[in-house]
Amino acid sequence: AAGVIQSPRHLIKEKRETATLKCYPIPRHDTVYWYQQGPGQDPQFLISFYEKMQSDKGSIPDRFSAQQFSDYHSELNMSSLELGDSALYFCASSPRLAGVDNEQFFGPGTRLTVL
Amino acid sequence: ELKVEQNPLFLSMQEGKNYTIYCNYSTTSDRLYWYRQDPGKSLESLFVLLSNGAVKQEGRLMASLDTKARLSTLHITAAVHDLSATYFCAVSMDSNYQLIWGAGTKLIIKP
């Protein structure tokens, strides 16, 4: 079965650089979520999109932005990178249907290292 | 504000033993999820619990939900080494689909 695809899988950047992470949801899933997970931490919700519109916003820094495109893939843009941005970034997708469990399926993650 | 607490945060046990991980949440929730994560890997969905009294089992893992007590449990029966991982519970509500996560329980099962 098709899964969530994330690219790149690993990314190394210098401080103050920019990074773009991409997420391709499972086919027919209309909702995409972004999470950040630091070492030994639980995932922190950043932002989500439903039908190409921002749905919920969590602890996403102002330096970050995201969008969902017409083909439902999503991109997380990160600017002025800081050392503390080093983390695993997960994308998850789900179908958003009333009365359904809205289970979120996670991609393999992008490991971002800021030097 | 919805908060999720897991305990224990760390659990080391011998193969063949039984144990339970607890997940408490602070406000009424519509959905509770259990995920497994191996080090440096993705989050694998284990169970989705939607209603009071829901019980689901997969192999040596069984999850239950008591919405009145705002408590879910993940029970491990006759643990085997392959179950070593970090287990997270997470909660969401109809009004807000984002997942609020517990801190995770790092489970080490010794052969």
Image (cartoon, helix red, strand yellow):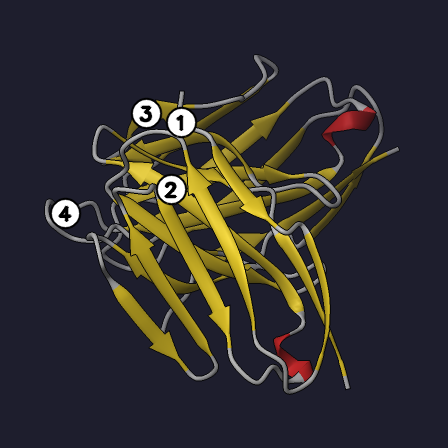
Identify residue for label 1: B2
Disc 3 from disc 1: Cα separation: 21 Å
Mark 4 Cα shell of 10 Å, populated few (<14), some (14-19), many (≥20) = few
Residue behind mark 3: A54
Mark 4, residue position: A97
Dot 4 and dot 1 within a common chain: no
Residue drawn 72% across the image and 17% down it: A80
Q: Looking at this view, name the residue that lies furthest to the right.
A: A115
Q: Amino acid at mark 2?
A: Val
Q: Are marks 4 and 3 in contact (CB under 8 Å)?
A: no
Q: Which residue is mark 2?
A: B91
Name the residue located 73 percent from the left edge and 29 percent from the top edge: A85
Q: Chain of mark 3?
A: A
How far is the residue under mark 4 from the one under mark 3?
Answer: 17 Å
Residue A21 at what x, y percent from top left? 58, 40
In this rendering, which labeled residue sits more in front, label 4 or label 3? 4
Work out whether A31 lies above or below A78: below
Given the image, on which type of amino acid does mark 4 rest?
A: Leu
CB within 8 Å, label 2 to label 1: yes
Q: Chain of mark 2?
A: B
| Rendered location of residue B85, percent (x, y) | 65, 66
- Measured from the top left, where is residue A32 in percent x and y? 36, 42
* Residue A105 appearing in the image: no
Residue A63's place in the image compared with A104, above or below, is above
Task: Specify whether disc 4 shares its chain with disc 2.
Answer: no
Q: Quadrant of the C terminus of chain A?
A: top right
Marks 3 and 1: which is nearer the front? 1
Of marks 4 and 1, the one in the foreground? 1
